[in-house]
Image (spheres, grey):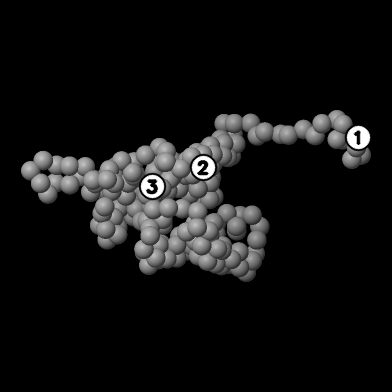
Amino acid sequence: MAAFREHLTFSCGLGAGYTATLVYGLGQEWSHSLVAGLLCGFAGMLPDLDSDSGKPAREIFGLVGTVIPLILLRRLYRAGFDPETTLLLAATAYLLIRFGVSRLFYRITVHRGMFHSLPAALIAAQIVFLAHDRPELLDRIVLAVGVFLGFLSHLILDEIYSVDIGGVVPKLKSSAGSALKLASQSMPATFATWTLLCLLTYAIGVQQGYVQPIHLEVPAVLKKATG
């Protein structure tokens, strides 16, 4: 398994390459491309949120608690909140993630569980896509792809380090295949992960107008009883 520093170095290098590709290859705005590259480097640490060692996980949750409110600031402002209320909501989101979500996450996850999986990488990218309030679809895709690439780099590096090349013949370690997976041994965790992925995909489809929202009609019997 690759160490925390190796994951960070790898994802940050990938983020730098992604930024350069966006700016010089695709002609994207440099500031937005730089944010996408930084998110790529940051996302390379995300799978370690389920780490058994406390210090890296606490540091990452601190960064998550900072990054998500920053992404939400534009959306909160466009929603009509005044600057004071916007800052208050952002601070509340930080505290909720840092001290509330983190403790819940530790209780319900295991190391190398479904958070170390391809569906989890897609979930992280979709959350950023939905959270970033920018009218240009491409700008939101750029950030989401950056998060996906960073998350995926962590999984790939874990799989590379699961090959033992110390002997004459390379051998697979017991951790081989536990990162780039679609399901885990826990059926509830697998079901919950795929359910969340489907819900986020549906939310994006509705937001972009590709899918019609589901309207649940109240049966006529209940309407008469309540009314």
What residue sits 80% from the left and 34% below the top?
218
Q: Which mark is residue 116?
A: 3
Q: Which mark sits nearer the N-terminus, 3 or 2? A: 3
Secondary structure at badge 1 equals: helix
- Quarter residue 64 falls in: bottom left
Q: Which mark is residue 109?
A: none
Residue 179, position as x, y percentages in the image? 34, 44
Secondary structure at badge 2 equals: helix
Measured Cα–Cα span from mark 1 to mark 2: 39 Å
Residue 223, position as x, y percentages in the image? 87, 35
Determine if residue 218 is in view: yes
What residue sits 53% from the left and 58% below the top?
104
Q: Which mark is residue 224?
A: 1
Q: Which mark sits nearer the N-terminus, 1 or 3? A: 3
Q: Which kind of residue does numbered mark 1 sit on?
A: Lys
Q: Which mark is residue 188?
A: 2
Q: Which kind of residue does numbered mark 3 sit on?
A: His
Measured Cα–Cα span from mark 3 to mark 2: 15 Å
Callout 3: few (<14), some (14-19), or many (20+) C-alpha neighbours within 10 Å? Answer: many
The image quadrant where one finds the C terminus is: top right
Determine if residue 121 is in view: no
The answer to whether residue 5 is left or right of residue 75 is left
Q: Which kind of residue does numbered mark 2 sit on?
A: Pro
What residue sits 38% from the left and 47% below the top?
116
